[in-house]
Image: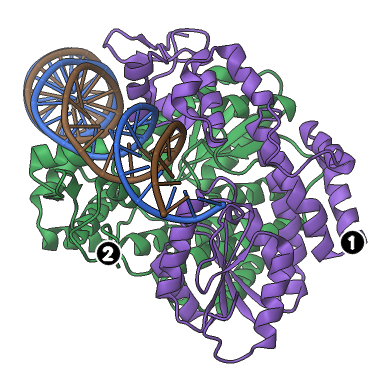
Chain colours: A purple, B green, C blue, D brown
Amino acid sequence: MTNSSVSSGPGLPIASVERETGLSKDTLRVWERRYGFPTPERDVNGERLYAPVQVRQLAQIKRLMDRGHRPGKLMTLDEAGLMALDQVRSSAWPSPDDQQLEHWLSLVKTHDTEALQRAFHREMAKRGMARFVQDIVAPLIARVGEAWSRNELGVFEEHLFSQHLEKLFRTTLANMTPKSGDPRVLLTTLSGEEHTLGLLMVEALLVVEDAYPVLLGPQTPIDEIVRAAQIKAVDAVCLSFSTAYSPALAAQGLRDLRLMLPADTQLWAGGYGVKPIRKAIDGVCLMPEFQDLFDCLARWRSEPGGNTADDLK
Amino acid sequence: MTNSSVSSGPGLPIASVERETGLSKDTLRVWERRYGFPTPERDVNGERLYAPVQVRQLAQIKRLMDRGHRPGKLMTLDEAGLMALDQVRSSAWPSPDDQQLEHWLSLVKTHDTEALQRAFHREMAKRGMARFVQDIVAPLIARVGEAWSRNELGVFEEHLFSQHLEKLFRTTLANMTPKSGDPRVLLTTLSGEEHTLGLLMVEALLVVEDAYPVLLGPQTPIDEIVRAAQIKAVDAVCLSFSTAYSPALAAQGLRDLRLMLPADTQLWAGGYGVKPIRKAIDGVCLMPEFQDLFDCLARWRSEPGGNTADDLK
DNA sequence: GATGTCATTTGTCTTGGTCAAACAATGTAC
DNA sequence: GTACATTGTTTGACCAAGACAAATGACATC
């Protein structure tokens, strides 16, 4: 009651806004100085108190920036203008006019988790793991991510969806973890890439293909990847990149890693995040589509022994 | 090669030190001004570059602060003095028998994942879930984190360990997910807190206690937590905080959330990260130990109906 | 279409200062 | 001796205004 923060009252302190929006305190202050937005009140001690409305607007601006818009432009827009941008259908996305996809999405939107779970199991049994991942899960994840960035669904729905998928893959994988298999593949992401689902999907595909995945989880520094590859004696390192990851950073990281890895260790990179990488990187196999994973696998198997990993393209 | 940052070179920029030590940029600068430590070099542009040795010392100091020591005292100590304090096996730890803990730690260090997996399953069967989590897993996680910050093991070992635990909990939970149960508890963390293991442990404990957990995964903004709590009609929201999370931020976040949640929804906060929070927060149940979770549960069950959530303490 | 140059935008870092909350120490009543 | 109020010290978060490099966009050239 007597608390001075939050609710319809004065507003949130800058630290809370940083937590809620993901914008650093420095950024929040410099925007205020440069663009005159946001416009926080001050408490008795002169410290900023942000109105909840503006916090929501800031979160929306952050989302639009992740979609490629620049702050300078967004600041000139009013609430309606921002809303309008949210609605824009970017043709860059894989066309989502698939009716079934939209049906899945509606299950996510309505939190019908039981129906979702049932549908997942049914489709997996019907199509088999490989086709299930490629035809259903991957497009659906992309569609959910897109819907989220467009504010059609909230963080809550997105989290719930992710948790269900994670549970699905982990329970399925639990009953078929192999004791051996070739090739041995290390699965992880570079620092900054938090998404785990891509890794789980690849793990599932590798297991059904009788390979031996070593799941390391997300965000491993490059030198630790090298050490892990050596200790676990893997034949290949497979990284996953989501759309959020900057293509330039991804390319740089792959080049750095390639230089530090032994020449006979393959380096594969998958996920929507590698699609924008045009130029091939020497000794790195880019796999924008899941199908490419099978190609990499087949190529490795057809060329056993000391591949110098420079024989791709 | 041409990379100007990191590696044995001059030193790390302040942002990297913040990430690695968990000390804020503000704190790092104010320490330098007040205590004359640390003593970073400067690059051509006058920006701080911290020597790797000092970064390790800073991490050590942070660890000792988490154990209750005050910065002012620690700064007067030299390297040997810090080491001496570090070696003190603080009796605050609930460690059952140190010897077994060290044995487990050696399994982590040597990447003997199969032995680790076997040992986990054996101990869980032997002790039951509740004691397994409290006596084995929680101390072991703390010990691994400590060993990591002491540079006794690398990111690779730490990730592998986390993945094994995650797999263990998820497969175990998969076979006992309840259809109903009371109370219904939403499990998540605030933005900025990435650690999921705490949530999985709580989920496991809730399930064996015949409650109904709703796992949302990490990093949910507060307004989405509120929405999720309403839609999923939960009786309580349970947040988890690791030591990495600043106590001040945790307290602020809990206050923010408490104000936005309905009064009849309980708010519980667990994990090592809440230990340093001394002052009680109105309407929030702090659970620094796992045992406290059972207390919260028992209290809720003994007082059904419209608790106004102000009856704790 | 690829590549190079230049201008603008943008976020992070800098300094040095203020202040509330947390903590330790001391005094006082019971 | 213990409980509690009071005072003094420590500590980190916040503030302002400026500087600058890295990223981005625009435009010319090969």
Residue A271 percent coordinates (x, y): 63, 56
Residue at 60 percent of width and 59 percent of height: B166
Query: Looking at the picture, which amino acid does disc 2 mark?
Result: Ser
Query: Looking at the picture, which amino acid does disc 1 mark?
Result: Arg
Q: Quadrant of the N terminus of chain B?
A: bottom left
Residue A192 higher or lower than A104, as above or below: below
Residue A208 percent coordinates (x, y): 77, 73
Q: Residue furthest bottom?
A: A305
Residue C12 percent coordinates (x, y): 31, 39
Q: Is residue B235 visible?
A: no
Residue linked to disc 1: A127
Q: Are marks 1 and 2 on the same chain?
A: no
Residues under labels 1 and 2: Cα distance? 48 Å
Residue linked to disc 2: B7
- Local SS, label 1: helix
B124 on left or right of D5: right
Q: What subunit carries mark 2?
A: B
Res. B297 image quadrant: top right
Nearer-the-camera pick, B307 or B247: B247
Residue B219 percent coordinates (x, y): 54, 39
D26 on left or right of B171: left
